[in-house]
Amino acid sequence: MQKSTNSDTSVEMLSSTCQGTGAVQMRIKNANSHHDRLSQSKSMILTDVGKVTEPISRHRRNHSQHILKDVITPLEQLMVEKEGYLQKAKIADGGKKLRKNWTTSWVVLSSQKIEFYKEAKQQALSNMKPGYKPESVDLCGALIEWAKEKSSRKNVFQITTISGNEFLLQSDIDFIILDWFHAIKNAIDRLPKDPTKTSRNRELFKIQRSSSTELLSHYDSDIKELKPEHRKSLMFRLHHSASDTSDKNRVKSRLKKFITRRPSLKTLQEKGLIKDQIFGSHLHTVCKRENSTVPRFVKQCIEAVEKRGLDVDGIYRVSGNLATIQKLKFIVNQEENLNLDDSQWEDIHVVTGALKMFFRELSEPLFPYSFFEQFVEAIKKQDNNARIETVKILVQKLPPPNRDTMKTLFGHLTKIVARASKNLMSTQSLGIVFGPTLLRAENDTGNMAIHMVYQNQIAELMLSEYNKIFG
C-alpha cells in the first residue's frame, strides 16, 4: 500500500465484469496536479452484495473513509432501474424449447440484468433460503422484440439472451407494458453487443451516472472514438438525464388520458373506422353484410361436423384447444379464406368450440331478448301439444336471420342425436350444452338457476319436436 499526505482527492470506481461483483479497485488521485499520479490506492473485495471490507481506521484517513462509505453503496441497490409485477413465461433454455407456462413474477430490472421473484423483492429476500439465487436474464447482447404470434395474450414481448434463453413478458395494461419494453430496451442498448467489451461499457455507463466534469474530461478520448451519431446520443444522455425523467412522466400521463378518453368499439364501428367483425356482432349485421339469412361461418362449421364428426364421442361436449379456437376466430374476423379441411383444424372439437363461441359472443342471443320470457312461459305449459304449438308460433314471429339460423342449427343437431349410440350425445346432453348459449335473459339477476332449467328444456323441445316446430 502506498501512502501520501495529499488531502484533496477524487474517487474513481472501476469494475471488470458484466455481473457487477468481484474485485473493486479504488484509486485516490491528486486533484491539484495532473503530473502527480497516484497518491494512495487500496484493493478491496466485496465479500457479499452490499458488504465492503472496512479500511483500517487511522486519524489522518478519517476524511477519506467517510468518502468511501458514501460512494460504495450496495451494487444491487445502486443499479436497480425498475421493478414491479408482470406475467412471465420461459419458452427456451439454452436453445431448447420449453412448454409455455405463465406465472406472475416480481420483476427487477438493473443496469445489466433482470431478476424474477415470486413476490416483492424485499419480502422475497427475507424469505429466501441460504444459497438460493433468483432466476435472472443477462441483458449483455440480448435481443428484445414484440411477439404477438407467440401467445394469444395481448401486449407480449420476448427477450432472447446470447446463451439461447427466451422469456416472454406480458401485462394487460398498455402503458405499463410499453414502459417496461422501453426501459429494458434502453438497458440493452447501453450494454455492448459483444460481452468481451463489458469492461469498457462499464466505464461509459459510469459517465452517464455521474455529473462530474472531471470524469467527463477524463473520458474525452473514449467519447471522441465513438461514431458521430453515437457520440451525440451519449452526450445527450449525459446532460439531459433529468429532463428524460420528466418527459417519461409526461408520456405516461398522456397515455393514461388517451386510454380513459378513447372512443368505444361501437362508436368506432358507427363512424366506419373499424369494420364489423363476425364474432361479437349482431346476427342481423352479419347476415346483412353477407346478403344471407344464415351466416357463412355457421354453414361451414356444420358442413365440417357432418362430414367428419357425427360419430365422434362427446361431439359438442368435449372442449377443443382454446388457443387454436382463438386462432380460428382471428382468421374468420379478418375475413381470410377459411378452409376447415386444412390440417390445422383437424381436431373437430376446435370447429365445434368455435361454433359455440360464435353463438355465445353474439351481441344478442339467437333467441332475442324480447322473446325470452315468452319462450319461458311456453315451456311452463303442462300440456305438451300446447307447448309445441306456442313455441311454433313464437318461432314464426322471429326475424328471418334468427328463424333460419335456428332451423339450420337444430336441423344439424337432430343428426347428432340420430347417432347417439356412437357419439353418446342425447337430446338432454345437447340441451345442456346449447340451452344457456342460445337463450338468456337480458338482465339475469337472481334467477340464474331457474332460468337454466328452462333454457335446457326449451333447447330439448326444439330438438325432440323439430319436425312439428319447423315443419
Image (cartoon, rainbow, N blue to C red):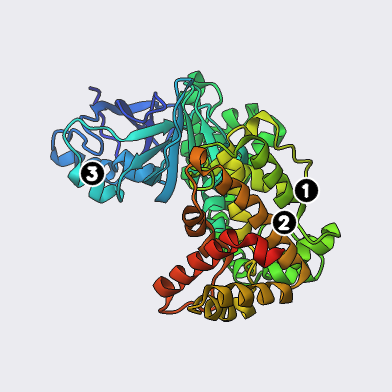
Label whose residue precedes the other's in the sequence (3 or 1): 3
The residues tagged by marks 3 and 2 sit, at their Cα atoms, a distance apart of 50 Å
Which amino acid does the dot numbered 2 rest on?
Ile
Which amino acid does the dot numbered 3 rest on?
Leu
Tag 1, which secondary structure?
loop
Which amino acid does the dot numbered 1 rest on?
Glu
Q: 194 or 257, which lies in front?
A: 257
The residues tagged by marks 3 and 1 sit, at their Cα atoms, a distance apart of 51 Å
Labels 3, 2: front one: 2
CB contact under 8 Å: marks 3 and 2: no
Q: Quadrant of residue 25?
A: top left
- Which residue shows up at 30% across the image and 35% down it? 134
Point out residue 306 in the picture as x, y percentages from the top left corner: 66, 41
Q: Which residue is identified by label 2?
A: 278
The residues tagged by marks 1 and 2 sit, at their Cα atoms, a distance apart of 8 Å
Q: Which residue is identified by label 1?
A: 335
CB contact under 8 Å: marks 1 and 2: yes
Q: Quadrant of residue 39?
A: top left
- Which residue shows up at 62% across the image and 32% down it? 346
Q: 198 or 173, which lies in front?
A: 173
The correct choice, above or below, for 133 with respect to 270 in the image is above
Please state, as top left, top right, bottom left or bottom right, where the C terminus lies in the image. bottom right
